[in-house]
Image: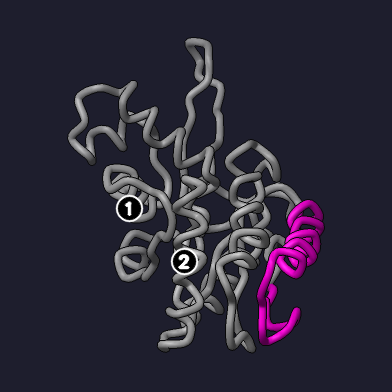
Amino acid sequence: MRIKNAGESKVKTQSLGEFGNILAMRPMGRKVQEALDAQLRGLPPGGVMVLDFSGVDMMDYSFADEALGTLYSRMSAKEYPDRFLILSVADDELSEALMENIEVALHRREVAALVLPQSVVPEVIAALQAQAENPDGPPSGLALDDERQNLEWRVVGGLPGHLVDTLRAVMDRYQVTVRELADTLKIESATACNNRVAKLYQLHLVRREAAIVPEGGRLYSYSAII
């Protein structure tokens, strides 16, 4: 899937540390949630917000649930259409500790977030921006099969194992139809496979694009956010 509307900024980066190094309690979470909400709504279609935790020393559950749990729940409820939120985490003990309350908050709300190592974020941002600037050009490096096999990512929150496997298949292939996905996962029922990937789309973990087929109707393809 090619990101359209060349020239528009498709990527927004935001550090929670800009709101303070101690993030606690629901009133503060609500204030941050409102700020992030405005930024998500301001993204153009296909846009991605990458949220990191630079400068944050402590985050409690109440804040995590109010600030991030609410946003991901709204995504699942069809707010922020065709906008995506990715978490970026450094490889250290503090960052993993901060993620614990986010994990619990998302799991309890039965939503999930895509998480990238901070080290790969510059490459991801460059690829997304290149697509926006030249939507009809050749695929970026991250869209190529040999590059995607080495792309590190994980999911936090309430995503069952079979949906993680489905997401992995989409991430590895970059773009697939339901039939291709069913063949990859060895699922006999196209309907069952469609239900899986439709759930990922509802959670804003994959993109979806419809094409009109000659015999009539639409053919949906699904692709990775990055």
Q: Which residues are magenta?
A: 14-43
- The vertical placement of 24 against 104, above or below, is below
Task: Tell whether position 34 is magenta.
Answer: yes
Residue 208, position in %: x, y? 53, 38
Q: Which disc, if any, is residue 49?
A: none
For image coordinates 34% across by 44% down, the residue present is: 163
Residue 63 visible: yes
Q: Are marks 2 and 1 in contact (CB under 8 Å)?
A: no
Q: Mark 2 belongs to which amino acid?
A: Val
Give the labeled residue for mark 2.
Answer: 115
Q: CA distance from mark 2 to mark 1?
A: 13 Å
Task: Tell whether position 10 is magenta.
Answer: no
Residue 55, position in %: x, y? 64, 89
Specify few, some or many for label 2: CA neighbours under 10 Å numbering under 14, 14-19, or 20 or more: many
Specify few, some or many for label 1: CA neighbours under 10 Å numbering under 14, 14-19, or 20 or more: some
Residue 63, position in %: x, y? 64, 67
- The main secondary structure of the magenta stretch is helix
For the residue pair 147 and 44, the one nearer the viewer reads as 44
Tell me the SS state at disc 2. Answer: strand
Left or right: 151 as drawn, with respect to 30: left
Residue 87, position in %: x, y? 54, 68
Q: Quadrant of residue 129?
A: bottom right
For image coordinates 47% across by 50% down, the residue present is: 108
Tell me the SS state at disc 1. Answer: helix
- The vertical placement of 118 against 200, above or below, is below
Q: Which disc, if any, is residue 168?
A: 1
Q: Mark 1 belongs to which amino acid?
A: Arg
User: Which mark sits nearer the N-terminus, 2 or 1?
Assistant: 2
In this rendering, the count of numbered labels is 2
